[in-house]
Amino acid sequence: MKIIAVTNIKGGVGKTTAAVNLAYLCAAGGRHTLLWDLDPQGAATYILGVEPGAHEPASAKKLLAGKRDIPELVVATGYSNLDLLPANLSYRKFDIHLNAHSNPTERLLKMSRSLRELYAVLFLDCPPGISLLSENVLRAADVVIVPLLPTPLSVRMLEQLHDFIHEQEWQDLVLLPFFSMIDVRRLLHRELMASTRKRFPMMLKTEVPYWSEIERMSLRRAPLPAFSPASTAAQIYAALWREIAQRVGRRPQAA
C-alpha cells in the first residue's frame, strides 16, 4: 500500500481540495483507494457527502489505544474504489493522546498496517500546523504532496519542511510540492514561482489556479472530476495526478 500525505503547515492553501480530487482520480484509475480525513474540521468528509451520524465515530484516544479496528470505521463514498475514514472532532487532541504512547512518532505508521491488505493507496488529508501528528504523517508517508501558495511565507515553510526531512535522513520520502491558488496576473506570484523552481527542482510542473470553479466543490459536495470532468479545472487536477503517479514510479491508469 502506498501512503500519500497531502499536507501544509499553513491552512487555506487548497490542501483538502487537492486531497479529495487526487484520491478520486486514483480510485477512478482502478486502484482501491482510502482517504483518511485527519483534520478535525472534517472538510474532506463534508465534500465527499458523508453526514454526521451516518457512520460510527471513534475517538482519537480509542484509535491510538487499539480499542477500535480501523477497517470497521471505513465508509463508502458512493464513488467506485474510493472509501473514506471520516474525521472526528476528537482529532483535535491527537497530539495529547500520541504523547501518551511509547514511540509516538511511529504510531500512525503502525495503525495503517491493518489497511495494507485492503487498499492499494492511502491518502492522508492532514490538518495544518507543526505537531506530533504532522511528524507521524511524515514518518508514515511514502509521498508528501505540498500545495504551496506563491508567497514568501509559503516558500519559507517549504524550506523548513525540506530541511526537517533532510535532518531526519528520510531518504525514501518523496517530497512533491506544487503551486496552488495562483494568479498569473500578479507579478509577485510569477517571480516567486520562477525563483522557487530554481531552488527546488522537485516542484511539480502542474499549477493550480485560484478559480471559483474549483471552490464550487464545497457547494456541490463532490470531487471536481466527478461533477465537471470536461472542465479545464478538472483537467488540471488530472494532469497533476498523472505527474504525481509518474514521479513515484507508477504510471496511472486511464480514468
Image: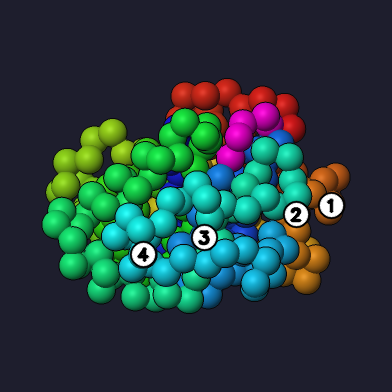
Q: Which is nearer the eye, 94 or 208?
A: 94
Residue where numbered disc 1 is placed: 228
Residue 69 visible somewhere in the drawing: yes
Highlighted magenta segment, given as a residue range = 29-33
Which residue is denoted by mark 2 in the rendering? 224
Marks 1 & 4, CB-CB < 8 Å contact: no
Give the alpha-carbon distance from disc 2 to disc 4, as whole Å. 34 Å
Q: Are marks 1 and 2 in contact (CB under 8 Å)?
A: yes
Question: Which image quarter is the C terminus in?
Answer: top right
Residue that appears at 57% across and 23% down: 251
Q: Give neighbour class at mark 2: few <14, some 14-19, many 20+ (Cα, 10 Å).
A: many
Dot 1 amino acid type:
Ser
Q: Secondary structure at mark 1?
A: loop
> Looking at the rendering, in which quadrant would you find the N terminus?
top left
Figure check: 43 above or below 201? below
Q: Amino acid at mark 4?
A: Lys
Name the residue carrying label 4.
62
Q: Amino acid at mark 3?
A: Asp
Q: Secondary structure at mark 4?
A: helix
